[in-house]
Amino acid sequence: MVIEGVTLRPAPPTDAEVLALTTAQQAELAAMYGEDQPLVALHPDIAFTVLTLDETPVGCVGLQPVAPGLGEIKRMYVVPSARGWGLSRMLLEVVEEQARTAGLARLRLETGTKQVEAIALYTNHGYQPTPPYPPFENEIASLCYAKNL
């Protein structure tokens, strides 16, 4: 998929644009779920991709290796003003290709019960419901998915 004006670049979890996007994501989720939770520090081994549209950062996705052959998608986000153009699909395809290149055979992720667009994106791309994994096993608003690559 090619969208004019889109660029993708790798970034560490300490990157200013990654921090701005993940902070915006957490604020949106806090408003959605009525919870004011502190922003959890990003694990240093998450490899992020930042998506810019006409040089403005509008999305990101992280890939964290968690076990041999297993990776986890972290903090996938597109700002509300850039939704509906297929950017989330683009980010998902990018992170899956990165996982394959890294030798990962399976990806997992966690999303929330109120994030219907995210749930549709993942299930439409072959992600299947999976039992909750730590630290989400007791979170009633969490849904976990996984996909063999």
Image (tube, rainbow, N blue to C red):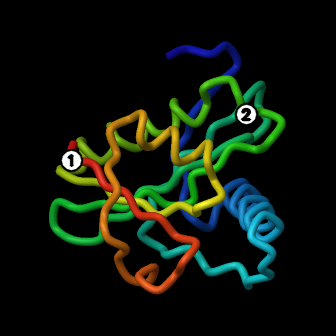
Q: Badge 2 is on which residue?
A: 83
Instruction: From the top left corner, tell me how far across and down residue 26 is, in percent.
Output: 73, 67
Instruction: From the top left corner, tell me how far across and down residue 96 is, in percent.
Output: 35, 41
Residue 148: which numbered mark, if any? 1
Three-letter code for the amino acid on which mark 2 is drawn: Arg
Seen from the viewer's position, the closer of residues 149 and 46 is 149
Please, what secondary structure does the residue beneath circle 2 have?
loop
Residue 46 versus residue 122 in the image, above or below: below
* Picture quadrant where residue 7 is located: top right
Q: Residue at x 57, y 59 (%)?
A: 75
Disc 1 to disc 2, C-alpha distance: 27 Å
Q: Residue at x 70, y 27 (%)?
A: 84
Q: Residue at x 52, y 32 (%)?
A: 89
Three-letter code for the amino acid on which mark 1 is drawn: Asn
Which one is earlier in the sequence, the residue at label 1 or at label 2? 2
Residue 23 versus residue 88 in the image, above or below: below
Q: Residue at x 61, y 80 (%)?
A: 41
CA neighbours of label 1 inside 10 A, class few (<14), some (14 to 19), many (20+): few
Residue 84 versus residue 80 in the image, above or below: above
Q: Quadrant of the C terminus?
A: top left
In the image, 69: left or right of 88?
A: left
Instruction: From the top left corner, tell me how far across and down residue 31 is, in percent.
Output: 83, 67
* Picture quadrant where residue 52 is located: top right
Please, what secondary structure does the residue beneath circle 1 have?
strand
Q: Are marks 1 and 2 in contact (CB under 8 Å)?
A: no
Seen from the viewer's position, the closer of residues 18 and 129 is 129
